[in-house]
Amino acid sequence: MKPRHPEKIKNIVSPLKKKPDWIRSKITDSKIFFQTKEIVNKNKLNTVCQEANCPNITECWSKKHATFMIMGDTCTRGCAFCDVKTGKPSSLDPMEPFKISRAVKELDLKHVVITSVDRDDLEDGGANHFRDVISEIKRINTKTTVEVLTPDFLKKGNVYEKILEANPDVFNHNIETVPSLYLKVRPGSRYFTSIELLKLVKIKKPSIFTKSGIMVGLGEKKDELIQVMDDLRMAEVDFLTIGQYLQPSTKHFPLDRYLHPEEFKELKNIAISKGFLLVSSTPLTRSSYHADTDFKILKDARDKALECHRPQ
């Protein structure tokens, strides 16, 4: 059997640290969970919930919330923290936009998150496919808001503009970690490329909410996290998520430590003081965790901010 992560086979074994009491996934309605799973499987779709081994899958799927991962299940990069399969991807499925849209309708989603593997093999990095998926969702589900979590489109020029043509409601691109760890944690990515992408999206489409996320517990320092917050605010990012890194296997990037919930609260307070409209900072926070509820909070926060700046 072909290994899931061939680039990690020769890595030094890093034993998994025992999880503290506060790292516990919620178990909820299993009946709805299996209904969600049936819809995903029936339409032959991939979800980041499954492929990235998300700790919140039971809770989210029990609410009929799923984050769809387009363009296959195989990534062209090999980030040291990620559990998504790596290797040579298959060709794009031209029916995927329709399949995704149909699943969104069956699940009756009011807000949907679309992410993808990195597709460095494609000339446009998959930007046109993103556009087609968003457009089809909005065509069939006229009241559904769409959030995208995209790759960085490194060395692909301005292809990200294709996604903006479809008017997603939220554009998310995760910064993931601090600059000093990039070569080890995200060797195929560049920190300032990610910052620049988020900045350009806001310049091109000011009405779109921009969002980014960072993992903690990889060995970063507090002042480095604060610098990332400042860099994201310079790019006018609206929403920041901060979550605990959970080491997927002994061959993945080694976990440095588990942060206490009080540390997450402190990071949230610091981030809010920087001017983010919304900050989600808990051990189990992930990019699309509670995304539907957060979108409503984002809209309310922007409306309130606009009201405060409106001339009396």
Image: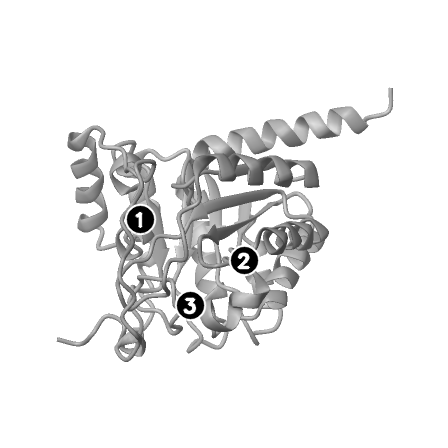
Badge 2 vs badge 3, beta-carbon distance below 8 Å: no
Gap in angstroms between the C-alphas marked 2 and 1: 18 Å
- In which quadrant is the N terminus drawn? bottom left
Q: Earlier in the sequence, mark 2 or mark 3?
A: 3
- Amino acid type at circle 3 is Asp
Q: Amino acid at mark 2?
A: Ile
Instruction: Measure the alpha-carbon separation of dots 3 and 1.
Output: 18 Å
Q: Residues within 10 Å of mark 3 (few under 14, many from 20)?
A: many
Q: Secondary structure at mark 1?
A: loop
Residue 74 horizontal side relative to residue 219, left or right: left
Asked whether 300 or 81 is in front, the reply is: 81
x, y percent for residue 16: 27, 57
Label at residue 118: 3
Q: Where is residue 133 drawn, in percent x and y?
A: 42, 54
**Disc 1 designates what residue?**
54
Which residue shows up at 66% across the image and 43% down it?
A: 207
> What residue sits right under mark 2 in the picture?
175
Sequence-earlier tag: 2 or 1: 1
